[in-house]
Amino acid sequence: MQVEVAGQKVELEQGAVIADALKSVLSNKQFKNTVAARCGDKLLDLTAAVPSDCAVLEPLTAETPEGLDIIRHSTAHLMAEAVKKLFPQAKVTIGPSIENGFYYDFDFERPFTPEDLEAIEAEMLKSVGADKPFSRKEMTAGEAATFFAAQGESYKVELIRDLGAPQVSVYTHGGFADLCRGPHVPRTGLLKAFKLLSVAGAYWRGDEKNPQLQRIYGTAWANAKDLAKHLQQLEEAKKRDHRKLGTQLDLFSFHEEAGAGFVFWHPKGALLRAILEDFERKEHLKRGYEFVQGPLILKRDLWERSGHYDNYRENMYFTEIDEQAYGVKPMNCLAHMIIYKTRIRSYRDLPKRFFELGVVHRHEKSGVLHGLLRVRSFTQDDAHIICRPDQLQDEIIGVVNFVRDIMKIFDFDFTAEISTRPEKSIGSDQDWDRATEALRQALEKMGLPYEINEGDGAFYGPKIDIKIKDALGRSWQCATVQCDFTLPERFDLSYVGEDGGRHRPVMVHRVLLGSIERFVGVLTEHFAGAFPVWLAPVQARIVTVTDAQKPFAEKVLRFLLEKGIRAEADLRNEKLGFKIREAQLEKIPYMLVVGDKEVEAQAVNVRLREGGDPGLKPLEEAARMILDASQEPFKRGGMRYSFSTATGPAD
RNA sequence: GCCAGCGUAGCUCAGUUGGUAGAGCAGCUGAUUCGUAAUCAGCAGGUCGCGGGUUCAAGUCCCAUCGCUGGCUCCA
């Protein structure tokens, strides 16, 4: 048969081995770097036969994403071999490749220690040195089950049973055998650049009710250089960790004596929040939102009626006032619905867009708290849009547009997901289908790529989740758009239609930044603490050279403050270099040096955080420079403010 | 909540096999008046997260608890 092998037409015999086929066209060096092969969308072991329907056969090196993935997965096998050798009682489960590396879960009588990891790593290196071949063997499911049962590998037996396939593959290298679909590198000698990183508990099949396994995480790369680079990046990421920067920049703190997951905002952090909040208020007004505000606690009866008590109770705080039970709000929707219901609404009044920077409290499990990114008390930039069913699509598009504009202003990339009905939920299948479809169509119309997250919706409706990444590449949900046909029903929301009859509106829950706390956290890491001028709590610091310039420096400060610039003056009796250093460490965008020359010229000497040095500038010009810079993201943003007004259908 | 690791001065960290706590920075006082990332000197600062226990003796060992970190599960 004719096959195009690595770009060359080759005549192969039926059943020819891939490695041989590749060897015939590749140089020795190229072949040595080949870890597997691809035929169409199939990834294959080098030891496999060329499939009879294969037209194009490509070698995969460690440099390709697929090749790297195979290296990582193979390294997981290598680790499992080492673990079984050192701890024969450990049972193997699964070991996939993940971003930057791999993990493998073991059932073992005790947790692995850091010393164990060292021993395991040493054992892995031995196996690499021995350069053992990975060999694949096909077995019937029955044979494989018997084979693994004989070794006491009960998890593998369970996997074989659940796979339900008649035929399975078993890979062996050295004395170690593992059930796996493959493919793998041909020899352990190809796995050189890896490091075991940590141990963690993980539930079998990700279910809390299952036994907890011992998971070992590792990272693996094509070569030592890439590995070193990655480890270096991990170090770099630590430097931009918002928890560290939060202390360094004096933005916020946490206090054991006050309670876990509660943020204390220091002056600069509180100012940063306020800047974000002002920005949001303005942008919401431009888009036809109205401000509302409800109380922090509401009677428990209301939470029972809304379904929160049944579905969200374990995340709520409760209290009692005058022998009456109350719940602290974990969400803002109830107050907004109550406000909606204070009068009869006409179809002409819709959509109503109620916005609130609402403080919510959620009892998150202790183990999930994480700096600002996961707290127990936070402020949502929350809105509820109550509209007619025929307006739903446009409203969702409006919100997604809003999200896109905002993310552009902050210079964030984001990914979108649609989450569908979870097991624990309320409402009819029909409503869920309609709402899910509305969300899907909105993203389709806007041409945004998205993934489907089955069963991950809120209990009252499906949602679009927008995620952005932190310094370590972990994704955090910020914006979310949730359709809700259920709460309007439960709270009997209505509007009077053109026909004079009562109709049921639809409600959209949505947040843009998600929580101010989380957003500040991600923002801090995104900019490594060097906030753009429009967000920087301190935009300019005046630094004097000696005490002699104090009066002029104070004059400059008043001038800048009057212009609306967030400025402060460092008048301390310290050397200029020292004051510059401090301002630099505080990541203040503008340093305005004032010495005798500047007093003489009635000007300031501008130094930039980024390093440039615009030099001597008259006060007016310096102020304009700073104000211009703080407008920069809005100029490039291209915000869209179109929205439907609440006047109903054409008159 | 679960698994593991960690909690020493405001911050960053030392502290030997158990022998009774130390540095740098920050702070305070004084000197210095200086041109773009650290001026010098002195002083002060700790119930070693909190509570039990073992021991002649605990920052060090054990138990419990609170908190933090990395995961798991869950979520904005």
Image (tube, coloured by chain):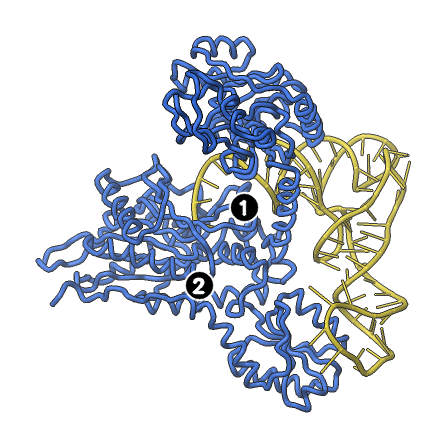
Q: Dot 2, how many residues are within 10 Å of its Cα: few (below 14), some (14-19), or many (20+)?
A: some
Secondary structure at numbered mark 2: helix
Name the N-terminal-most of marks 1 and 2: 1
- Residue position for label 2: A409
User: Image check: A508 left or right of A550?
Assistant: left
Chain shaded blue: A
Residue A418: quarter of image: top left
Q: Position of residue A465 (x, y in %)?
A: 38, 48
Which sits in the foreground, A150 or B53? A150
> Which residue position holds label 1?
A369
Q: Residue furthest left?
A: A499
Give the vertical position of A548 relative to A496 (above or below).
below
| Chain B tint in image | yellow
Residue A201 in sight: no
The vertical placement of A342 against A462, above or below, is below
The N terminus of chain A - image quarter: top left
Query: SS at mark 1?
Result: loop
Residue B3 vs residue A463: left or right?
A: right
Give above or below for A256 relative to A354. Answer: above
Asked if badge 1 and badge 2 are on a common chain, one would say: yes
Badge 1 crowding class, 10 Å Cα cut-off, few under 14, some 14 to 19, many 20 or more, is some
Q: Chain of mark 2?
A: A
- Type of amino acid under label 1: Leu
Q: Is residue A430 visible?
A: yes
The amino acid on which the numbered mark 2 sits, given as a three-letter code, is: Ile
Residue at point 43% right, 11% down? A140
> Which residue shows up at 48% across the image and 15% down it?
A157
Task: Report the disc number at residue A355.
Answer: none
Q: CA distance from mark 1 to mark 2?
A: 28 Å
Q: State the image coordinates of residue A362 (x, y, percent, origin top left).
A: 46, 48
State left or right for residue A132 relative to residue A578.
Answer: left
Q: Is residue A518 left or right of residue A200?
A: left
